[in-house]
Image (cartoon, rainbow, N blue to C red):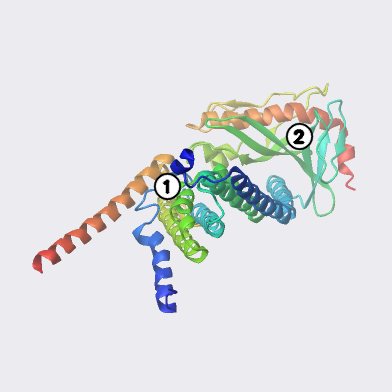
Amino acid sequence: MSPSPGKMSARNWDEFMEGIWRQNPVFVMVLGMCPTLAVTVSGVNALSMGIATTFVLVCSCGLVSLLRKLIPKEVRIATYIVIIATFVTVVDYVIQAVSLALYDALGAFIQLIVVNCIILGRAEAHASKNPPMAAMTNALGMGVGFTIGLLALGTVREILGAGSLFGISLFGADFQPWVIMVLPPGGFFVLGAWLLFFAALERRKQRKLAEATQNA
Amino acid sequence: MNSQAILPQTTPAAAMIRTLGLIAAICGLIIVAAYQGTYDAVQENKRIAVERAVFKVIPAAKSIVEYSALPAGGVEKIAAGATAPAGALKFYAGYDAGGELAGIAAEGAAKGYADTVRILFAYDLATSSISAFSVVAMRETPGIGDKILVDKDFLANFPLEAKVSTDLKALANAIVTVKHGSKTKPWEVDAISGATITSRAVGKAINDAAQALLPRVAPNLDKLKEKS
């Protein structure tokens, strides 16, 4: 029954890539929009939020998967929330220990990771049905995919809205920042532009596929 | 019998409670471990953050001591880890490399455009003026309200006169924010055109805090000067 090592790693790779591309939480599933729109005013914020969420995702999916045979289905949601809240609390303390400035910048959105639908969704849809390795690999892929999504928004908004990237000024003192990009509406503009871009890619792929089947 | 046929997979209550209890115990352990493990680093970070903020508004300062100005008058040093007594106002005395008093710093707060603007301002004893301020926390509109930190005309308001009145009850002249370009007195704050509300918040925050704090501190300067 046990698959060969080559098959196993291929399956792992598949689990990992699912979150990064095919089921990207931001651009394909459009999940977790609250932190996505709110904290992505700069590259550093986006990256730290992504890392924090990834940590919570991997740890909670690992623990849920380990305990999946123990958890009665009647109390599973309560269990998942307790587990997720635990790791969010850990992240909360760790970020305070690393940098208070970052903690202030992320504000309430660290605590709000508890109700991030990506995490609860993964626990319910994947971790509760798969062994720990597969669950954690899938969670890691989702986390990295989420981080990429946040970075895609954060870097664009920081470059346009503040004229800098990861705090390094790009255009010198004469640059007039496009301030609306770091305000809430800017989040919607940039997210909309990215979704448009990915939708266009998807359409092109399908047209090519249709042409290929017609020719064949 | 019948109910068993309808609900074949009912989990016994004991099993649910056991699982929830077990998970709560595991999670409790993880949280307490994380709290204990990061406690020292978090406290150290908070101390460094305060120190840095004070050094920024009192550039000559190399070390700080926390003081509280008691409601009955008089000042008292706050021991490390202790909190200021009720009704007392907390402020920081900054000392330069030679141990001389370089200035004092205190926090002030006032309602801005989006939320409360919390600032830290430095008071220069030699000239009896507010020499500089920095923002502790604000949610003002980027590019508009947050110009208080970079606008050259606004920063030119400092040093801002803040003499204590002769009866040691309040400031001789209340600090007021005036419309852009109409500043005539050394205790007036020239507002930024287009960011008047945030400018007013800075003026009010400094005025409220200075009115309460400086009359208490002024008679006790000798006590502050000797650094122990």
Residue drawn at point x = 69 percent, y = 24 percent: B174
Contact (Cβ within 8 Å) of mark 2 with mark 1: no
Compared across the picture, whether B23 is left or right of B93 comes to left
Give the SS element for disc 1: loop
Residue identifier under label 2: B128
Q: Are marks 2 and 1 on the same chain?
A: no
Q: How many marks?
A: 2
Q: Is residue A216 above or below residue B172?
A: below
Which residue type carries mark 1?
Pro
Residue identifier under label 1: A177
Name the chain letter of the residue that bears numbered label 1: A
Mark-to-mark CA distance, 2 and 1: 38 Å
Which residue type carries mark 2?
Ser
| Residue B102 image offset from top left, x and y in percent | 79, 45
Q: Who is closer to the viewer here, B198 or B161?
A: B198
Residue drawn at point x = 85 percent, y = 51 percent: B99
Residue drawn at point x = 45 percent, y = 43 percent: B5
| Residue A95 image offset from top left, x and y in percent | 62, 53
Q: Is residue A170 above or below residue A89?
A: below
Q: Who is closer to the viewer here, B179 or A199?
A: A199
Give the SS element for disc 2: loop
